[in-house]
Amino acid sequence: MFNFNLLAAVTVAVAVQGTLGVAVYGQCGGKGYTGSTVCDSGSVCTFSNDYYSQCLPGSGGTTAPATTGSPTTTASPSTGTSLNSKFQSHGKKFWGAAMDPGTLSIAASTTILKREFGGVSPENSMKWDATESTRGKFTFSTADQLVSFAQQNNMFVRGHTLLWHNQLPNWVSSIGDRTTLTSVIQTHASTVAGHFKGKIYAWDVVNEMFNDDSTGSVRTSVFSKLMGTDFVAVAFQAAKSADPAAIRYINDYNLEYSAAKRNSLIALVNKVNAANPGLIQGIGTQSHLSAGGGSSVKAALTAMAAAGVDVAITELDIRGASSNDYVTVVKACLSEPKCVSITTWGLSDKNSWIQGVSGGVLLWDDQYKPKAAYSAVMAAL
Ligand code: G3I
């Protein structure tokens, strides 16, 4: 995929040359950067990493960038200088972030998103309660905003999610018979996937259907109560009919920590695909990790890839956000040929679903400044 983000960054850099100052949150330094190093008043050029200095709000007027890297005349590495382009240079598809119109409306967030990322996942806007809160009445306006942003910025979209026991309207949970539920799943999955046809790289068709118990049992939900595990093939078939080109994933959490859960999921993928070849095409491992959890990812990716499907890290965040954990996860994906993408579940700690953890969980802090883990990942890439 041609890197329009890089082109946009170069265009902006060229545009600011010769002007008086760089607007707040604009780039003002870094390897390969040739634009103005002077910030508008009210912001100061702040060193982020060797590749990026940014005008951040603050006193002190305009200052020269505190770049410690190579001179700005040094050519950019041919691999590109964003998280996404560096990741792609290893043959990977994209590095994405969970977003929605709420976080897209934050200028600092969107500036970083456009510069560093190659994909988005809707954090909430494509879930059942957001798209079909009343039976047969579909609402796509919020998700449409995200998808249109992604298209304008040449980003991949991971659709999330067509079937999940959580954020599920009561009218679905209270269905009492298998025939009705089957039809409701088919209508929901095909209508949502059909609405976005051609715009979605991959769908999390089924999300979090297993328990964290010692056997990796199937979670009790209206779906399993009425249909056993048959709802899986029903949902995947509906998604396939509506948008055959979107890659179909089953997605879950704690797959790094629980061999029982992982084995159950893999067994289900093998069973469904034995009956319907190629129906499930990918396993998403959310990877909401504890501190130190990075080391458990590689073995999990290898085991899941053995099911003969793509694997993706779909909702990465790590408590404490240590550089070591983040780099370990990235290296795990790089070393597994079937690992196609990494998506972090958000961009800045400010907007993460996890709050109050020392060190945060993501690669940018709650001031939208890149953290040590960001620099470490960039160096590793
Ligand atoms: O939209 C309502 C708003 O109208 C209301 O005023 C407000 C009051 O609490 O709630 C808002 O809804 C919230 C919603 O996010 C949108 O912001 C819900 O309360 C809140 O529970 C919901 O949380 C989301 C959570 O899924 C729900 O389970 C998180 O943002 C989202 O990050 C999280 O994402 C999940 C993945 O989908 C699946 N894997 C786990 C991951 C983290 O929990």
Image (tube, rainbow, N blue to C red):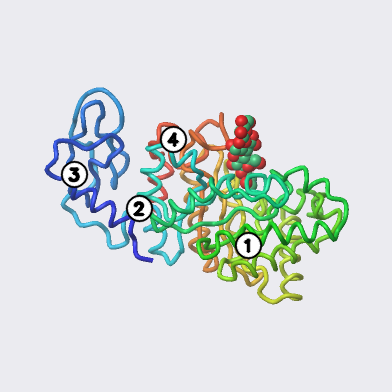
Tag 4 residue? 365
296 left or right, relative to 208: left
Residue at 79 percent across and 60 percent down: it is: 182
Amino acid on which disc 3 is placed: Val
Looking at the rendering, in which quadrant would you find the C terminus? bottom left
Instruction: Of the two numbered discs 4 and 2 on the same chain, state the one appearing first in sequence.
Output: 2
Label 2 or label 1, whichever comes before in sequence order? 2
* Viewer-side residue, 291 vs 238: 238
Res. 236 in view:
yes
| Sequence-wise first label, 1 or 3 | 3
The residue to which callout 3 is attached is 16
Using the numbered discs, state the Cα–Cα distance from disc 1 to disc 4 in whole angstroms.
30 Å
Kindly check if marks 1 and 4 are in contact, taking CB atoms under 8 A apart as contact: no
Residue bearing mark 2: 82
Judging from the image, what secondary structure is the residue with disc 2 in?
Answer: loop
Relative to 71, residue 107 above or below: above
* Helix, strand or loop under label 3: helix
Which callout, 3 or 4, points at the residue further toward the start of the chain? 3
Residue drawn where x is 80% and y is 64% of the image: 230
Which residue is more in the foreground, 205 or 171? 171
Which residue does the image show at 83% across and 57% down from the upper left?
180
- Disc 2 and disc 1 in contact, CB within 8 angstroms: no
Residue 194 appears left or right of 58: right
Closer to us: 103 or 30: 103
Whether residue 290 appears in this view of the structure is no
Q: Quadrant of the N terminus?
A: bottom left
What is the distance, in whole Å, between disc 4 and disc 2 at their CAs? Answer: 17 Å
Where is mark 1, residue-wise? 249
Rate crowding at label 1 as few (under 14), some (14 to 19) or many (20 or more) other CA atoms within 10 Å.
Answer: many
In space, the residues marked 1 and 3 are separated at their CA atoms by 43 Å
